[in-house]
Image (spheres, rainbow, N blue to C red):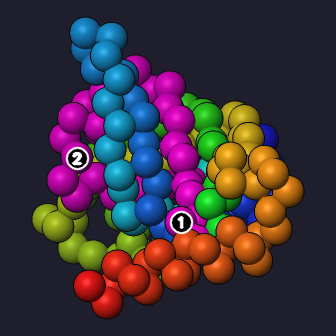
């Protein structure tokens, strides 16, 4: 599955993805990850800085879904795929991490690099658009809400 330029731009702009994995007992595990990067047209990656459960789940059961959402536009992207967990300190892991300026850090500062091969994507669109609102209208409402929140 190729990531379009718009999809790549969303991931690169937001960087925060909500990763869904499956625990040993079959229950869901959702965890936000703020280190996402686009490796190429078909792969995303994030660092396991403090996510031992997510990495363990993905190592055992590599099916994964990640959601990225622009909180102002209330639109986003759902990516489904297969994860591969590379332990920090391994040659392949270090090569990828050092090639990505947004990831580059000493191996002792993270546990693993998780690479996601994207198999399918779908848009995420808020019901705020259901009545015909434009992006400008939706974003103006959310900007006002955030401004009020920051001022309180």
Q: Which residues are magenta?
A: 44-72
**Residue at 43% from the left image edge and 86% from the top image edge:** 147
Badge 1 crowding class, 10 Å Cα cut-off, few under 14, some 14 to 19, many 20 or more, is: few
Which quarter shows the N terminus?
A: top right
Residue 71 can be seen, yes or no: yes
Figure quadrant of residue 88: bottom left
- Crowding around mark 2 (Cα neighbors within 10 Å: few <14, some 14 to 19, many 20+) is some
Asked whether residue 128 is drawn in magenta, I would say no
Q: Is residue 59 above or below residue 49?
A: above
Point out the residue furthest to the bottom here.
Answer: 151
Q: Are marks 1 and 2 in contact (CB under 8 Å)?
A: no
Q: Looking at the rendering, which quadrant does residue 16 occupy?
A: bottom left
Give the mark nearest the N terminus, 1 or 2.
2
Residue visible at 43% across and 48% down in the picture: 18
Residue for badge 2: 51
User: Can residue 3 be seen?
Assistant: no
Up/down of 22 relative to 41, above or below? above
**Residue, far left:** 108
In the image as oriented, which residue stretches furthest toward the top?
Answer: 25
Which of 68/134 is in front?
134
Camera-side residue: 75 or 100? 75
* Tag 1 secondary structure: loop
Asked whether 60 falls inside the magenta stretch, the response is yes
71 left or right, relative to 23: right
In the rendered image, residue 113, in percent from the top left (x then y), is placed at 36, 53
Which residue is at the front of the view, 104 or 137?
137
Instruction: Identify the residue at image location x=39%, y=72%.
Output: 103
Question: What residue is pinned by disc 1?
Answer: 71
Question: Residue 4 in the image: x percent, y percent?
Answer: 81, 59
């Amino acid at each position: 599955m190729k990531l379009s330029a718009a999809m790549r731009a969303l991931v690169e702009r937001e960087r925060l993805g909500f990763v869904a994995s499956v625990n040993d007992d079959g229950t869901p595990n959702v965890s936000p990850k703020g280190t996402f990067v686009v490796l190429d047209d078909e792969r995303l990656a994030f660092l396991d800085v403090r996510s031992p459960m997510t990495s363990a789940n993905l190592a055992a059961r590599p099916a994964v879904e990640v959601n990225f959402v622009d909180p102002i536009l209330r639109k986003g992207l759902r990516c489904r795929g297969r994860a591969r967990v590379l332990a920090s300190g391994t040659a392949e892991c270090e090569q990828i991490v050092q090639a990505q300026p947004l990831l580059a850090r000493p191996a002792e500062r993270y546990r693993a690099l998780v690479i996601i091969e994207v198999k399918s994507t779908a848009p995420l669109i808020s019901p705020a658009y259901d009545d015909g609102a434009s992006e400008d209208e939706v974003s103006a409402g959310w900007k006002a809400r955030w401004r009020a929140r920051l001022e309180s």
